Amino acid sequence: MTTVDQTNKEGSRNIYGPVIGQSSGQVMTTYAIHKHYGALPSLTVDEATLAAALQRLEALPSDVIPEPAPLPVPSRMQLSPNPFFIGRKDDLRALAQSLRGGATVVIGQVKIAAATGLGGIGKTQLASEFVHRYGQYFQGGVFWLNFANAVPAEVAACGGDACLRLHPDYRNRSLDEQVKLVLAAWQSPLPRLLVFDNCEDESLLQAWRPPSGGCRVLLTSRRAQWDPALGVRLLPLAILSREESIALLRQHRPDLVTSDPNLAEIANHLGNLPLALHLAGSFLRIFRNDISPAEYLAELQASQGLEHESFAGDGISPTGHELSVTYTFTLSYDRLDPGNPIDAVALLMLTRAAYFAPGEPIPRNLLKITLYTAPNDPHAVRQIDRGLQRLVNFGLLEEEVLGALRMHRLVASFVQELSRDATAQDAVEQAVLDATRDGTRTGMPEVMEDLEPHLRAVTENALAQAHRTAADLCDVLGQYLRLRGDYVGARPYLEQALRIREEVLGVQHPDTAISLDQFGLLLRAQNDPNASRPYIERALAIRQNVLGLDHPDTATSLDHLGVILNLQDDVEGAQQYFEEGLAIRNKVWGSRHPETAKSLNHLGLLQLKQGNLAMARENLERALTIREDVLGPEHGDTAESLHNLAELLEMQLEIESALSFQERALEAFEHALGRQHPHVAFALNALGRQRAKHGDYTAAVQAYEQLAALQQEAVMPWLAAARGLQLVADLATERGEYSEAQHCLERALDILDQPTDVDDLTRSRILAQLGLLLYDQEHWNAARTYLHRALTLQEGRLGNRHAYHGPLLQLLGDIVFMQGDAIGARGYYSRAVTAWMGQPQAVVVPARALVG
């Protein structure tokens, strides 16, 4: 036990200054409290008691989470265990590792851990759960202090008859003396756990933590950064996982099933914030007979921000806090004083942060740009940084490891409801537009990946006003998605950009021509040149009339229209447009510009189609040289040139060189556009074909395996892979490598078994090819099985009397005859004649032609 010398040589003089009896916002000076700690009487602890307590602390587990247990006597803990507590196992273990004793504990050293995060994240609840599970290992007791109240009174309450019982006449002692007695006990080497709940100020921690002794201190705070001199180990709390969020909702409504998609959507709408989920679960429990999860979700989605009645909160709070999301956020928001210059900047930054994508990391510089009035003024920049730090310390923004900032979606709704800053949304729209526009202009969409969520969110918000910036944002987002190969996702944004520009700017404006051009490119990418052509032609007409015949944008439209005509087999018209565009680009940009390389590339492809391989090679090589020199080896345009040259070299039977270019093209496409882009599928398909022609069947199969694994519906990679494996099988068969051919065909069938919408004729052809391969090797039974499967699929698709069945029926008849079943063979031959009857042209079609 602890023995305290009760002599008070200083009498009852109040050495705490104005802090006693006042709010926690008024703190004592560090000098005063340290002077008091330094003047405390001597402390002694019985050696046996201390040894037993240290041994108990060493038993505190850091890997296994113990069950709740009664707290040691004496302790002060007002919160009961929460039956709705969910998850946080890793956080509990992290706290245990930070606060446990063990052989390495130095007596006299105070360890401090802090659970930090925004309001409603569950800091107090985590601390309470830790106390009820791990408090049993602190034999000196657990003492919970709410720093939102008057701190000296909270400290003094730890020494009374219900807790430490520090003096027979403790109740009649002055507050000064009570506090002094408690602080003296805290400096004992006996292990104790002090919980400073809602401790937001560094000066409060510095003032009240014991400078020595066996205490461990656990803080809960919205403050995310602490002075390193305080020795605080931070434990930033994250929102709950989706599974934990659903489990928390089901704690209130166990009759609901985990797989109910409405629960997942409710959790998503609430940003997986524990307080909001607790309120939602309580609401669903109270009104279980009146509202379903689906109806509650619809109400949440229809309400604005935090207006729904469930956020007001009913019932009993497990932590004793106000059950209101709005109130919880208001506690932090109200700490910002508009009259303070730094807080005024913080309020402006807070409002701007609310218009970015909620819950997504916001690049710090991007957020700062929304408020730059004098970017070269170091004082202004530092003032913004100070304001942002205030928001982080108040729990309104979360700071990422690399400096990015994140705002919870409910905080964003709360701020938008309070904001009166009419310039905030416009500033964010312009900043995001400026930051993303270059990614589409340069053809490097990967630089925009981190900004995509913000571009989407800001664009959706801007569309409500349908102004010029909204059209610009739609255009950039649509171009980004098109470049990424998401043609379906790009279409509505490009359509809206065109509609807004026609309405706001007019049908003859150059920006309208941009939208026409981009929408035409999208339709072309979707293999619809006929639909694309009118848009490209309208864009060309506007640019010729408004910008002039020699403008680089006019050259762009000429180039795009040439591609359309080439796809429509109007070779002469395409060549005219390509040459006109090339002349303009040479004149405006010079012969070494990437735009000039585009014209050279398209002209080379046209010449390739015409069979003029020498001129095609010259122009394609010139385009590649420019792109490699100016754009770099990993740019998407460079990849395109590598791919085109590989195709030409394959036609010239330079297979080894074609392989080298195609492998480089694939690597560049993946780097520039992402693995799921259609261009990656095209490169893999060509690479597999070229590897097969080179005789490397194993590598060819590997390429087609990678192609089949792509998640790109627009080009049906699984179908292309299956057909590519058919080609490999053909080449292997020609070289007598039957086992390799069989493996390719069997793998093709496996690939076609994955999608649900594969044409049965495609599958039947592969089955027939596999049957024919086995037939040639005289594996009669296996050949018969595959040919019969192929026939069944064909008959199901084409009917019983189609000419295509004749060759398969004849082969089956041959097999059955060679197996000694003449009657069975006659039946197959008879059916073959029936299939051919009335279609004499089909008689001469051999089976091998039908399976190729």
Image (cartoon, rainbow, N blue to C red):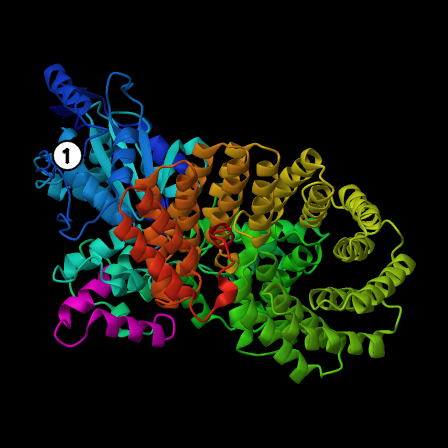
Q: Residue at x 65, y 54 (%)?
A: 380
Q: Position of residue 757 (x, y in %)?
A: 39, 61
Between 119 and 845, the residue placed more toward the observer is 845
Q: Position of residue 589 (x, y in %)?
A: 87, 56
**In the picture, residue 479 is in which quadrant?**
bottom right
Q: Position of residue 128 (x, y in %)?
A: 20, 45
Report the span colored magenta: 278-306
Q: Residue at x 36, y 31 (%)?
A: 35
- The residue pinned by badge 1 equals 66
Q: Residue at x 56, y 41 (%)?
A: 688
In the rendered image of this protein, does residue 191 appear above or below residue 202?
Answer: above
Name the dominant secondary structure of the magenta segment: helix
* Residue 285 lies within the magenta run: yes
Would you call the spot at circle 1 few (<14 residues within 10 Å), some (14-19), or many (20 or more)?
Answer: some
Q: Position of residue 635 (x, y in %)?
A: 68, 46
Residue 7 in the figure: left or right of residue 750: left
